[in-house]
Image (cartoon, grey):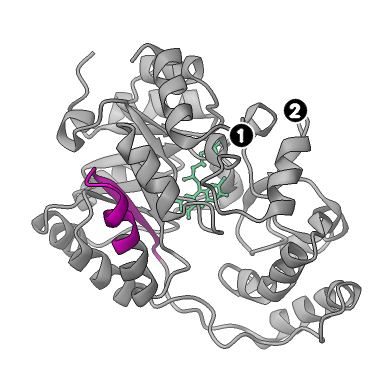
Amino acid sequence: MSRPLCRKLGLAVPLVQAPMAGGATTPALVAAVSGAGALGSLAAAALTPAGMVSEVAAIRALTDSPFAINLFVQDTPQPDTASLDAALARLAPWHAGLGLPAPGLPDKWCEPFAEQLETLIALQPAAASFTFGILTVGQVACLRAAGIMVVGTATSLAEGLAWQAAGADAVCAQGEEAGGHRGTFLGEQSDSLTPMLALTRQLAGALEIPVIAAGGMMDGHDMAAALAAGAQACQLGTAFLRCPESGISAPWKQALAEAPAGSTRLTRAFSGRLARGVVNGYMQAMADFEAAAPAYPLMNALTGPLRAAAARQSRAECLSLWAGTGVHRAQALPAAQLVASLAAGCAC
Ligand SMILES: Cc1cc2nc3c(=O)[nH]c(=O)nc-3n(C[C@H](O)[C@H](O)[C@H](O)COP(=O)(O)O)c2cc1C
């Protein structure tokens, strides 16, 4: 089957390792995946511009193969104090439970997107992917003029059409099975929960630009189904979380190793944006509050100290255990071996 997207990126395998903020996508993981003939992606949303420069240098020290950098498209928020106070009050007992001081406001809510984008363009990766929002036509043109392929995340047909109109080279169709945050930027996040195969088919049928399928794929057979539905490549995240090169914390990795089928759900309780993870005590106890949690990145920043302490103290019950519906099928294989097994399984 002809896959211009893979040809353009020089990929031997129609596979993208998903960018995964939260520590998973170390330079070692990105380089191992890219070196094995797929496209590694560095999650840069939580990195400072200087951090982006050093992570990219580390990738380039390990491989000459193409890779992608991913950012969240976001503005620095203007918080409303009442909703912050309510969230801090709900977080107080969790802090006490971990022996932390009372929760407070962070030094910053998120990294500065404009500077991150400028840094990304200067770093000139083969591709750049974006989620949580959409770039302007001018920003897309700047990236393309620098020789960077632009991939926008879409959770609905309307978002796919918007990225196409903005000039993107490809769209990543994020099905509802996907681990981590929903990329939705048009309408309600809870209204854009189409399963991966249906969304892929819909976008591939309607768009002129290539579609990369994402969500719930764990082996080569899953990939083959997405390619048959019209995708030119498949983006897998959860499948890579247990790789030795993945940098997630030990209690998170352990929770994934023990997660049975059906153990994930979507929640706003950690970050203020709908995201899929393994259900734990925090998610259950905060279920009555999650609808009122201040929107991303506010709640995400407010829960930062709690999540960091939970990782240090191996307290998985209050850690964000982001993972997709296929978590119970994730294997602890070295990344290059996983890429080879995925390629063999989809015969692609
Ligand atoms: C731990 C984790 C973190 C993620 N972080 C990001 C991110 O930083 N940027 C992004 O575009 N997508 C992110 N995603 C979503 C992935 O791009 C992709 O949609 C998802 O992993 C595909 O579903 P799967 O996990 O079932 O393979 C993340 C997913 C996970 C599991």
Of callouts 1 and 2, the N-terminal one? 2
Whether residue 105 appears in magenta in the rendering, the answer is no
Amino acid under disc 1:
Ala
Q: Which of 35 and 149 is in front in this view?
A: 35
Eyeballing the image, is 136 above or below 151? below
Identified at 52% across, 21% down, the residue is 219
> Where the N terminus falls, by quadrant?
top left
Q: In this figure, which residue is indicated by the disc labeled 1? A: 332
Q: Residue 316 at x, y = what percent?
A: 79, 55
Q: Which of 259 and 268 is in front in this view?
A: 259
Eyeballing the image, is 143 above or below 88? above
Q: In this figure, which residue is indicated by the disc labeled 2? A: 261
Question: Can residue 96 be seen from the camera position used here?
Answer: yes
Q: Residues within 10 Å of mark 1 (few under 14, many from 20)?
A: some
Eyeballing the image, is 240 above or below 321? above
Assess whether mark 2 and mark 1 are in contact (beta carbons under 8 angstroms): no
- Highlighted magenta segment, given as a residue range: 57-73
Q: Residue 131 at x, y = what percent?
A: 41, 54
Question: Can residue 159 be seen from the camera position used here?
Answer: no
> Where the C terminus falls, by quadrant?
top left
Disc 2, SS = loop
In front: mark 1 or mark 2? Answer: 1
Disc 1, SS = loop
Whether residue 63 appears in magenta in the rendering, the answer is yes
Amino acid under disc 2:
Ala
Q: Which of 66 and 114 is in front in this view?
A: 66
Q: Residues within 10 Å of mark 2 (few under 14, many from 20)?
A: few
Identified at 50% across, 29% down, the residue is 196
Identified at 57% across, 67% down, the residue is 296
* CA–CA distance in space, label 1 to label 2: 17 Å
